[in-house]
Amino acid sequence: MLKYMIVLIQFLFVFNLNASVITFDPPPCSTCGYVKSLYEESGVSFNGSFTHYGMGSNSRAVNDIAGGAIRFAYGSSMSIQLSSGALFTLHQVDLAEYSSVFDGDEIAVLFTGFKDNGTTVSQTFTIDGLRDGAGGIEDFETFIFSPGFTDLTHVEIGSDIFSMDNLIVSAIPIPAAIWLFGSGLIGLIGIARRKKA
């Protein structure tokens, strides 16, 4: 019985951490970018005004050399939500300087999450402004969201002049589905025990 309960707990733990890494790959081309109003990847929808660009042959910290990213110029904005409309959690994100024009300037990037219960949660990450990655191009830093960034309907980004990559998102499982699976598993355990007796 204990063995079956451990399996159930492990399943529920993994089910809750079913995260997707949004890599923004592939880029539109290796040396250019273009303004988008909608981008979708792995069931996550990004709406606003931003540039999807490629890193070309230059290398950088954290990200693969051929990967794409999202760049926020002056006046850029973005709203993030699941394409299905389900609730979600943000776990972490990679942020970097926008270009050499802003070398040495720290940039504060504000994420505001809108929760299912009508409240909001916000967090500001500050990019160091140093282009110190390999290859002389933007060096992405990893930032972790606080535990409050869960049960979100959508998230808005209220800053500009930065780049974003490797956003980790997970959908909130529907409680009814978890309990249905759990009760089914417990029923199977009961049947198995009766057969042994």
Image (tube, rainbow, N blue to C red):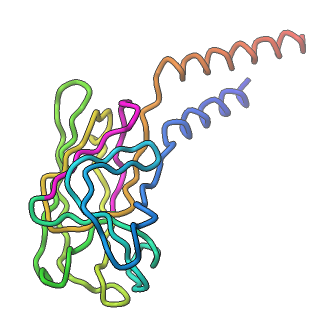
Location of residue 84 in the rendering, given as x and y in whole percent from the top left corner: 41, 32
| Image height of 186 relative to 113, above or below | above
Would residue 24 appear left or right of 107 to someone viewing this image? right
Q: Residue at x 16, y 53 (%)?
A: 77
Locate residue 144: give its quadrant. Answer: bottom left
Would residue 41 appear left or right of 186 to someone viewing this image? left
Locate residue 109: give its quadrant. Answer: bottom left
Would residue 155 appear left or right of 13 to someone viewing this image? left
Location of residue 108 in the rendering, given as x and y in whole percent from the top left corner: 13, 63
Q: Residue at x 15, y 66 (%)?
A: 73
Per the image, is 50 magenta? no
Q: Residue at x 74, y 23 (%)?
A: 1
* Closer to the camera in the image, 147 or 141: 141
Give the position of the C terminus as an image quadrant: top right
Location of residue 74 in the rendering, given as x and y in whole percent from the top left corner: 10, 65
Q: Which residues are magenta?
A: 76-93
Q: Main secondary structure of the magenta part?
A: strand
